[in-house]
Amino acid sequence: MASVLDNGIKYLSGVGERRAALLERELGIRTLGDLLYYFPFRYVDRTRIYRIADIRQEHGSSYVQIRVRIQGFSYQGAGAKRRFIAHVSDESGTAELLWFKGIKWVEKRLETDRDYIVFGRPTLFRNRLSMVHPEMELVERMVNRPNGALQGVYSTTEALSENQLGTKGIYNLVCNLWPLVEGVITETLPERIRRANGLVGLREALHDIHFPSSPQSLRQAEYRLKFEELFGIQLGILSRRATRTTRNDGFLFPRVGRHFNDFYFKKLPFELTQAQKRVIREIRQDTATGHQMNRLLQGDVGSGKTLVALMTMLLAVDNGYQSCLMVPTEILAGQHYASITGFLDGLEAKAALLTGSTRLRDRREILDRLAAGEIDILIGTHALLEERVQFANLGFVVIDEQHRFGVEQRARMWTKNMRPPHILVMTATPIPRTLAMTLYGDLDVSVIDELPPGRKPIVTRHLYDSQRLALYGFMKRQIEAGRQVYVVYPLIKESEKMDYKDLYDGYESISREFPLPKYCLSAVHGRMSAEEKEEGMRAFKNGETQIMVATSVIEVGVDVPNATVMVIESAERFGLSQLHQLRGRVGRGSEQSYCILMSGEKLSREARARIDAMVETNDGFRLSELDLKLRGSGDINGTRQSGMAFDLKIASLSRDTAIVELSRRVAEEVLTEDPRLEKHENLLLAKLRDRFSTSGDTDFGMIS
């Protein structure tokens, strides 16, 4: 199988050197196997052939198929407006086929007095049927094609289409491919698994995914290929997890010493929730086993993840190890440093802050003290990844808002020691179950599902732009009561293509409505320097300004308990996850807090669904499930951008939840009996696991 499918695509009939280079550049198709696994994204029914006389105006929005004979050709216009016309007929009437582009290529391939199957979108002009740029196929050639009632439609690009490799061109290549490969396709799943899960064979599935004879055969092919893809991924994930948990190269944290106890009994600002206590126990158990810990901590905004992280870092200090906390922004790093040093005041543990803005002299001093073991907890941004940042004995790494770091960036933290440190990755973005099983399946997962005592649920309201005066009145009443307000915009400056409120225009409008000296405003956005953003945040945090006008740069890293109102302008522009994150910037004190979602009157169905969900619930996990359904898995949590190490070819984490759970269950059953897949009956599964395993030696190859 491999010898044929690994052959270069250039050797396939209809490709050649130039098209092969295009296919590789545009679609990543290098080999015959790549093309075989390049699946259609939808299908058209090619079973019905219309007579010309039967086509009416109502077909104008859909595609139809006719069988005609070419009677002759003609031309209209000149230069760029030149048209090539084929005059065709059947026993019921006549029609015209028109081309505006690629005329020379079409002229060479069409012949008079030949019968063609024509597929296209019909229009009626002056009672004459016409089709623009239809697909053409000689009848005798279609007879020799693989039998498929439904014809696949393949994704393509403009560059490929210009070289006659549009969706029909790719379909033609697949037709040329199938006779070469059908005899060498070998099974990848053992018969017992196929039989137990109702799966067709691989050869049948690959044929029917490209040339389905019926909707039923297509469903069976899709189910088989989706299962194989997700099952292979789960085998890889769970195998890595099993390998990690059987190694004994993790640092031991057996002691609970004075750093932890002094903080717990003397400095703890409030009673821990039962969820926080449970997570700390889980981490203590992990770090006492001798295995390296890899744990994901999920907790909704304001649930107290940072306090848990600090207490577990103090466990590391009690056992003679250093810790670090890496966060995505300088604002967040500064905030964590301020809160952690406040907690540690009067205790022996020493913390330091390292960011890109740290002055050179201070940086040198921090690096020297770190290497000498004089700093117990280092807090910082991407600056922690630099090679010159060397620890004396790094034993515990915490990564906050982990989806904002790329895989390679995070992996650099594991190389700060000869032995890998314990890892705790944290996210305030709740992760749907099926996504967690796939993206985070090799981690142990902890969840903080309680808010600290005294927190009140945030009241969320949806207002239209026409209700802005009512909004301003509400903001003034909150400010008069001594509270503060966020106003968040999706854009920094006006866009010609988007009719959304931008920050500059909004700042001016709010300044007119809330004038000096009675009201003071701050502004923070991503194009400001770090010093400017820090000053804007400092003024708001210290109560010197009552209104913070910002972009979503404040999505993470802002903690102002006195802020009770979050106004999100053009809320329809934001995804559910981001809306929920922004809402979490308020409700951090004991006062009742509010989130106001502003929008225009006209909303898409999806935008209205997002806004309605925000109004109905504060439950981040319910919102994450809806977000996955609305947006799909490609965008949620930035998985595509931040390093999902596999590229799903046919399965969808949002639509195929039942198959995700089934594949996970079957993989667990197989690996329980044969953890290394060494038994003869599992040799196929070992190959499948290796095919879907990620490259590299880090345990975090799959982490997003």
Image (tube, rainbow, N blue to C red):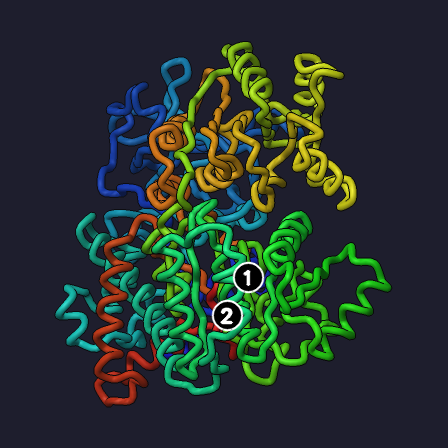
CA distance separating discs 2 and 1: 8 Å
Does residue 215 appear to the left or right of 25 in the view shown?
A: left
Specify the amino acid type for callout 2: Ile
Q: Residues within 10 Å of mark 1 (few under 14, many from 20)?
A: many
Of residues 490 and 274, the one drawn nearer to the viewer in this rendering? 274
- Please provide percent x and percent y for residue 293: 45, 74
- Please provide percent x and percent y for residue 456: 40, 34
* Residue labelled with disc 2: 423
Q: Residue at x 67, y 80 (%)?
A: 392
Whether residue 176 is visible here, answered yes or no, is no
Mark 2 and mark 1 residues within 8 Å of each other at the beta carbon: yes
Identify the mark nearer the N-term, 2 or 1: 1
Residue 299 sits above or below residue 393 on the image: above
Which quadrant holds residue 435? bottom left
Badge 1 element: strand
Marks counted in the figure total: 2
Of residues 328 and 652, the one drawn nearer to the viewer in this rendering? 328
- Please provide percent x and percent y for residue 159: 58, 48
Whether residue 445 is visible here, answered yes or no, is yes
Q: Residue furthest right?
A: 361
- Please provide percent x and percent y for residue 557: 60, 46
Of residues 176 and 390, the one drawn nearer to the viewer in this rendering? 390
Specify the amino acid type for callout 1: Ile
Tag of residue 399:
1
